[in-house]
Image (tube, helix red, strand yellow):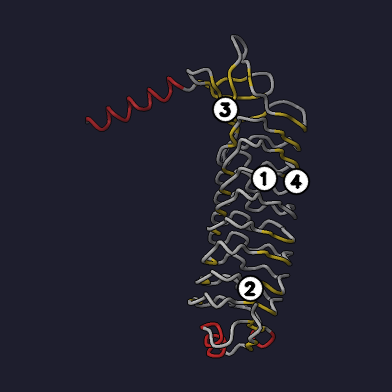
Amino acid sequence: MKRIIVIVLALLIMNSTNTLAEGREYSAYSNPDHTCKIFEYIGENTEIEIPNEWSFSSGSPYTVTSVGGRRDHPFSRTVESIIIPEGVNVDGEAFFECLNLRRVVLPASIKTIEVEAFARCENLTEINIPEGVERIGDSAFWYCSNLTSIDLPQSLLAIDNCAFDRANLYSVIIPNGVTEIGNGAFCDNTNLTYIDLPNSIEKIDRFTFSGCKSLKSIYVPEGVKRICQNAFSGDSELKDIYLPKSLSMIERDVFDKVVKKTMVIHGVPGSFVERWAKTEGYQFIGDYQ
């Protein structure tokens, strides 16, 4: 009985601190501290700039602190271009399945691209990741199938699971300082031909570059100690892979569905890599530098 009362009280408190309201162009939640979150665009323009302040039908303006819809209630089905000002955060699922969204300008104040923030924005072609961003969250750009290029900032530390899964990137330069690249981070980027990995990583995770069917070669930097299951599975055009002396573990099916007889492992003579390649039946050349 006590548990039920506590839950009811919690719900009453939540309802008393967030008020749903609509303005001329936006729907928003207002807070007692005179801030608000804009969660829907209901205007008619296709190019918009999120305001720093928003006034409802009456009263003084509220400070906009965040923006974003959710999976079951997209921010907009019609907007094509969005500019987000300084000081406004982009929430998780913020622009999930905004199918007409093509261009996004993010502010320098953002530190994280949140989970699924732009997932299934299938027409997104242009977005900046500002210097200062440290993490790109799970599935942040999942299924952005028209996103062909992205510039990652030097401030970046982590790219989470499936962050760019099923995007359409042609090349990826991951800056030094990134220490985490999650499961499936670049999975099924079928036109990806070039990857520049930083020497700050120690592991290539499961399915990270799986299904990158246009990738022909990759250089794994010194310092990487482990390549996990299916990391390059389905990379059917992969011909040359350069593996460092620091590597001490290669899990099963790393090169599943890669043509073994046409792929060459490049490594350091006498290393674990040479022993593994010969045991698994790969051609080995000792020319890693």
Residue, disc 3: 65
CA distance for labels 1 and 3: 19 Å
The picture places residue 202, in percent across and down from the top left corner, at 52, 66
Q: How many marks?
A: 4
Q: Is residue 98 above or below residue 58?
A: below
Label 4 crowd bin: few (<14), some (14–19), many (20+), radius 10 Å: some
CA distance for labels 2 and 1: 29 Å
Say what amino acid the circle numbered 1 marks.
Answer: Ile
Q: Nearer the viewer, mark 4 or mark 1?
A: 1
Label disc, if present, on residue 129 of the rendered structure: 1
Marks 1 & 3, CB-CB < 8 Å contact: no
CA distance for labels 4 and 1: 10 Å
Please name the residue shown 48% across and 23% down the image: 18
- Mark closest to the chain's N terminus, 1 or 3: 3
Please name the residue shown 71% across and 38% down the image: 105
Q: Nearer the viewer, mark 4 or mark 2?
A: 4
Label disc, if present, on residue 234 of the rendered structure: 2
- Mark closest to the chain's N terminus, 3 or 2: 3
Q: Nearer the viewer, mark 1 or mark 3?
A: 1
Marks 3 & 2, CB-CB < 8 Å contact: no
Callout 3: SS:
strand
Say what amino acid the circle numbered 3 marks.
Answer: Thr
Say what amino acid the circle numbered 4 marks.
Answer: Glu
Residue 58's image quarter? top right
The picture places residue 109, in percent across and down from the top left corner, at 61, 35
Q: Which residue is at the front of the view, 176 or 59?
A: 176
CA distance for labels 4 and 3: 24 Å
Q: What is the residue that sits farthest to the top in this orientation?
A: 59
